Image: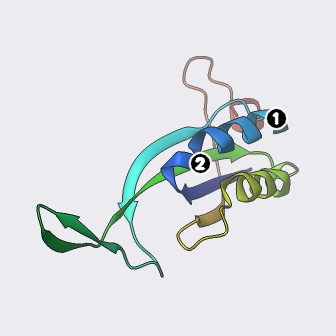
């Protein structure tokens, strides 16, 4: 099992959710986060004063999937979140050692 974590632009969330559903993934977790990478934030103008915004709003998606689906999940997230501009985000894949569905007690592959 793998845990796929993607940090994407907020306006791409619906596109990514639809793409993940089309692959057969039934669940994901979404968290609103802030951060920066090479983009290093941006400047904004408020009431005539210019100020630096260091942390940009992003969305973090977490998807637990089986080893055989992980490459496809990464592909569809990458394609759906891509705008071709700086700040599109990152995708991380880590091993998932154990999963338990609390309601039924199912474990590992059956739980995801």
Q: In this orientation, does residue 102 appear?
A: yes
Q: What residue is shown with label 1?
A: 22
Badge number at residue 46: none
Tell whether 73 sits left or right of 96.
right
Query: Residue lying farthest front?
Result: 48
Q: Residue at x 12, y 67 (%)?
A: 48
Q: Quadrant of residue 78?
A: bottom right
Tell whether 78 sits left or right of 8.
right
Number of dots carrying numbers: 2
Above/below status of 79 relative to 51: above
Q: Residues within 10 Å of mark 2 (few under 14, many from 20)?
A: some
- For label 2, the SS is helix
Place of residue 109 in the rendered image (x, y in percent of width and height, measured from the top left): 76, 37
Q: Residue at x 71, y 38 (%)?
A: 108
Place of residue 12 in the rendered image (x, y in percent of width and height, measured from the top left): 59, 48
Above/below status of 64 relative to 67: above
Place of residue 111 in the rendered image (x, y in percent of width and height, measured from the top left): 69, 31
Q: Residues within 10 Å of mark 1 (few under 14, many from 20)?
A: few
- For label 1, the SS is helix
Tell whether 77 sits left or right of 67.
left
Pick the front one: 53 or 98: 53
Quadrant placement of the C terminus: top right
Q: Residue at x 63, y 64 (%)?
A: 92
Colouring mode (rainbow / by chain / secondary structure / one colour): rainbow
Q: Quadrant of residue 31?
A: top left
Q: Nearer the viewer, mark 2 or mark 1?
A: 2
Tell whether 72 sits left or right of 46.
right
Place of residue 60 in the rendered image (x, y in percent of width and height, measured from the top left): 50, 52
Q: What residue is shown with label 2?
A: 12
């Amino acid at each position: 099992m793998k845990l796929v974590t993607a940090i994407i632009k907020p306006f791409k969330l619906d596109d990514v959710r639809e793409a993940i559903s089309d692959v057969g993934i039934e669940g994901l977790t979404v968290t609103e986060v802030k951060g920066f990478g090479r983009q290093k934030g941006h400047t904004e103008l408020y009431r005539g004063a210019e100020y630096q915004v260091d942390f940009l709003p992003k969305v973090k998606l977490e998807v637990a999937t089986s080893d055989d689906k992980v490459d496809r999940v990464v592909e569809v997230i990458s394609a759906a979140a891509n705008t071709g501009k700086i700040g599109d985000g990152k995708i991380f894949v880590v091993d998932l050692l154990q999963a338990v569905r609390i309601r039924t007690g199912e474990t590992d592959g059956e739980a995801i």
